[in-house]
Image (tube, grey):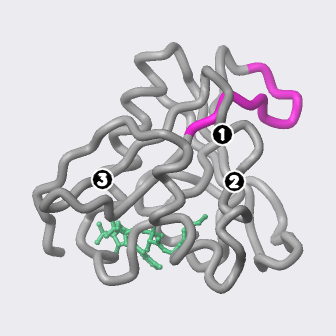
Amino acid sequence: MQVDTIQIKFITPAETYVVRHPVLRVGKPVESCKLEGDEDPTTFHLGAYMDGQLVGVVSMLIQEYSGQSHQKSYQLRGMAVLASKQGRGIGAQLIAAAEEEVTNRGGDFIWMNARLKAVNFYTSLGYTIDSPLFEIEKIGPHYVMVKELS
Ligand SMILES: CC(C)(COP(=O)(O)OP(=O)(O)OC[C@H]1O[C@@H](n2cnc3c(N)ncnc32)[C@H](O)[C@@H]1OP(=O)(O)O)[C@@H](O)C(=O)NCCC(=O)NCCS
């Protein structure tokens, strides 16, 4: 797999829309990119830059996982890489950076609602399926996937 040189930086919620919109909310109004918790002071957003262009984003929100007691659980949201830049290792580098930052902030567990199409991507990064397949309205089939950080 080709792995490009990218820079990963903290970005604002609004900056994520540049990638969220064409990848995750195709044909929908740009306001549909806004996710609950985006503006929480404890939420962080990472952007992957290639030659100065924002090409990938991920957001991490403190959110308990179905009543389980971990020290601090984060929900991964809005994971997206521009279509023309997918399959080059950018998503994997973003997840690695997000995991490192979660650990730095005292987090020990990450979970997300993973689109069926993205399950193999998360599996390759150590996440496991922890729910039956379920439908998110207007988006499609998902599994909950989880990872304990050590
Ligand atoms: C899913 C997504 C974020 C992955 O980012 P990416 O930069 O394309 O992924 P990478 O190139 O870093 O791939 C990392 C690993 O996952 C695998 N992978 C990536 N996308 C995959 C897919 N759709 N199906 C199967 N495997 C996949 C790669 O082969 C690679 O494995 P390897 O290291 O063993 O070769 C990106 O393809 C995307 O934005 N997809 C559309 C939006 C989406 O589904 N987002 C997730 C919402 S839950």
The residue at which mark 1 appears reads as 38
Find residue 48 and name its label: 3
Question: In the rendered structure, does residue 47 fall within the stretch colored magenta?
Answer: no
Using residue 104 as the reference point, say whether residue 68 is left or right of it. Answer: right
The residue at which mark 2 appears reads as 34
- The amino acid type of the residue labelled 1 equals Asp
Question: Which residue lies at the image location 31% right of the left edge and 59% below the top edge?
Answer: 54
Q: Earlier in the sequence, mark 2 or mark 3?
A: 2
Magenta stretch secondary structure, dominant: loop
Magenta range is 60-69
- Please provide percent x and percent y for residue 92: 34, 57
Q: CA distance from mark 2 to mark 3?
A: 19 Å
Image quarter in which the N terminus is found: bottom left
Q: CA distance from mark 1 to mark 2?
A: 7 Å
Find residue 11 and name its label: none
- Please provide percent x and percent y for residue 44: 52, 32
Which element is circle 2 on?
Answer: loop
- Please provide percent x and percent y for residue 98: 42, 38
Q: CA distance from mark 1 to mark 3?
A: 18 Å
Question: Which residue lies at the image location 41% right of the left edge and 48% below the top edge?
Answer: 95
143 vs 34, nearest the viewer? 34
Q: Residues within 10 Å of mark 1 (few under 14, many from 20)?
A: many
- The amino acid type of the residue labelled 3 equals Ala
- The amino acid type of the residue labelled 2 equals Lys
Tag nearer the camera, 2 or 3: 2
Image quarter in which the C terminus is found: top left
> Cβ–Cβ below 8 Å for labels 1 and 2?
yes
Image vertical order of residue 146 relative to residue 31, above or below: above
